[in-house]
């Protein structure tokens, strides 16, 4: 079973620096739509043919997946478990204090390895990754042997890659983030996920 993990394209939540991890807010910017179109064209050469696309229900991921599904002539389905890490009381905020709180927890997750740290009334990284992996497990049962594209979010994807995937190159952990429309190939072999490649877009 092989997956292509794709972070959504640029959204207004990125440009406005607002926490927007629930509901149907903050779709793609014009640049984001261009990024999604570029990634849609690039993914076939990078990943080969695939069966369908699954996405987070958040608007920025949904719109990215719709562009990619249309460009590749495949079906797009939504899975709630593919959503971004819940930020709890920080939802909807963009003030400097909220980012200080977020960045302190992010540092505990990705620098100190404290995956059980959580944002106020939000999820821990461990909870979010377990939720995400549960979705992948369901897809492995329902789509046995298929190649699938997963459009999701940078935080939960980074947590999965650094905590649950083997052979991830060091530049991903040193970088500490996943950019809009970055694509990462992983394959499930027996009981393990193995890294198989990385591609970014130029837009």
Image: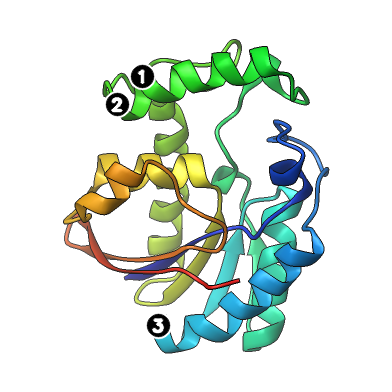
Circles 1 and 3, Cβ within 8 Å, touching? The answer is no
Q: Position of residue 42 (x, y in %)?
A: 51, 83
Circles 1 and 2, Cβ within 8 Å, touching? The answer is yes
Q: Which residue is mark 2?
A: 111
Q: Which residue is mark 3?
A: 46
Of residue 166 and residue 198, the one placed in the foreground of this image is 198
- 53 vs 26, left or right, is left
Report the quarter where the C terminus lies.
bottom right
Of residue 117 and residue 108, the one placed in the foreground of this image is 108
What coloring was used for the rendering?
Answer: rainbow
Mark 1 and mark 2: span between their CA atoms?
6 Å
Residue plotted at (56% across, 53% down): 152
Element carrying mark 2: loop
Q: Is residue 36 above or below residue 60?
A: below
Residue plotted at (27% across, 39% down): 163
Element carrying mark 1: helix
Q: Which residue is mark 1?
A: 108
Q: Residues within 10 Å of mark 3 (few under 14, many from 20)?
A: some
- Is tag 1's residue or tag 3's residue first in the polypeptide sequence? 3
Q: Position of residue 198 (x, y in %)?
A: 35, 67
Q: Is residue 126 above or below residue 139?
A: above
Q: Give residue 37's quadrant in the image.
A: bottom right
Residue plotted at (37% across, 41% down): 176
How many numbered marks appear?
3
Element carrying mark 3: helix
């Amino acid at each position: 079973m092989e997956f292509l993990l794709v972070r959504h394209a640029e959204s207004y939540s990125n440009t406005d620096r607002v926490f927007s991890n629930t509901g149907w807010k903050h779709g793609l910017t014009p640049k984001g739509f261009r990024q999604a179109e570029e990634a849609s064209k690039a993914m076939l050469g990078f990943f080969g043919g695939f069966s369908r696309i699954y996405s987070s229900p958040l608007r920025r991921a949904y719109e990215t997946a719709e562009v990619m599904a249309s460009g590749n002539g495949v079906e797009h389905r939504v899975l709630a478990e593919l959503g971004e890490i819940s930020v709890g009381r920080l939802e909807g905020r963009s003030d400097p204090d909220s980012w200080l709180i977020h960045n302190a927890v992010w540092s505990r997750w990705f620098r100190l390895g404290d995956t059980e740290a959580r944002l106020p009334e939000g999820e821990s990284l461990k909870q979010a990754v377990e939720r995400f992996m549960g979705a992948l497990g369901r897809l492995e049962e329902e789509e046995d042997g298929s190649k699938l594209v997963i459009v999701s979010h940078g935080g939960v994807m980074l947590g999965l890659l650094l905590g649950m995937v083997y052979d991830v190159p060091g530049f991903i952990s040193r970088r500490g983030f996943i950019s809009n429309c970055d694509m990462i190939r992983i394959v499930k072999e027996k009981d393990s996920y193995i890294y198989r490649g990385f591609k970014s877009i130029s837009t």
